[in-house]
Image: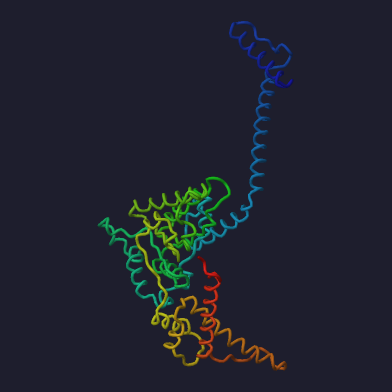
Amino acid sequence: MSTSTNKIMDIGMNFMSGISQNIKGEPVMSEVQNGITRNQVIAKVVSTVLGVAASFTLTYLGIKWLTDAMDPTKKEKKLAQAEAQKMLAKLGVQDAGKLSDYELCVAANLLDPRSMDVTWQKIGGLDNTIENIQETVILPFKRADLFRNSSLLQPPKGVLLYGPPGCGKTMIAKATAKAAGARFINLQVSSLVDKWYGESQKRAEAVFSLAVKLQPTIIFIDEIDSFLRSRSSSDHEATAMMKTQFMSMWDGLTTDPDVHVMVMGATNRPQDVDAAILRRMPSQFYVSMPNEAQRKSILQLILQNEETDVLNFDQLSQLSEGLSGSDLREACRSAAVAVVHEYVQSISRHSDESLEGGDLRRMSMTDLQTALHKVKASKTMQSSAFQPSIPLD
């Protein structure tokens, strides 16, 4: 034991001896045996305690600073929280200061439905699906009073949109949030992952606690199969715990009829989604590839504000067989780019003319036919790239 510690113990023993003498009726010495006064003893004890406390405080602050310095996501977390504060103020949330740090990290995924330019009128060829969603999803948000008298009329807490890629699943989700007047959390899986053990579960819990505070809320998970895919024994422990926490909090929504929170997912691989997740999504809508009539409607919708010649939409819809809605938009964009490219090429052949002041010609039927052939050839090339050149036994 150190010399200073022995000295403090000797002082304490002398001090206690003086107290015992006072209790026995013996006269109190004005000084302790080694000549140190009582006030000096108290001062030394207090200074020692303060020194130990200061040492512990400095050690704690040093470790905390070192931990923060080692966290590579600290800057991103602060930026996400700042963006969340701006979005919450834009949405008119008054008590944003009461949200926890985890809820603020999730709030960075909030989108303002009023700022979305996606409406039902801008989605072509999906009239039947839109009608079903309006009755199943939007009506419970708009007329909650109709669903209070029976447990069988409770709105679904989960909706799944599945089908081939590029057919408008994400557009339907955004249009649903806009039409329902609900807060829209476009949940990114990366915002739930943290390097520290147990933090991912807390963020998964914060998704639902934030949604309840901001209700009515729609939690949208695009490519849900990549996050909530079928569980197996090979899953990482942290990932399995995060999925379990997410499903546990999701179950809590179904037990409270007054909570207006809905989880909406979109995927083109429904067979990879965990069976427990599919059970929590009783309302499932298949968004198929557009047929000929739907392709005609989509093309008319895309080109309605463009400068075009007289177009034969029936012929274009027949020519675009096998293309999705996003493919059709890409074909129209390619046709428009071809018009600009032709104009630039014609100007480059006349060096004395400027690029300014010229007028672009209208988009023609030939431009669209060429663009559709190009997109179909590209899709054929992509599909054949994944086929083995030698047949497998």
The residue sitting at the left extreme is 149
Q: How is the image coloured?
A: rainbow
The residue sitting at the front extreme is 393
- Above or below: residue 176 compared with residue 211: below
Relative to residue 200, is residue 46 drawn left or right?
Answer: right
- Above or below: residue 270 compared with residue 316: above
- Above or below: residue 285 compared with residue 210: below
Residue 328: image x %, image y %? 48, 79
Q: Nearer the viewer, residue 85 or 211?
A: 211
Residue 138: image x %, image y %? 36, 66
Q: Which quarter of the picture shows residue 358?
A: bottom right
Q: In which quadrant of the rendered image does the N terminus lie? A: top right
Figure label count: 0
Residue 106: image x %, image y %? 51, 56
Residue at left 58%, top 88%?
339
Q: Which quarter of the picture shows residue 151?
A: bottom left
Q: Nearer the viewer, residue 321 or 175?
A: 321
Residue at left 50%, top 55%?
96
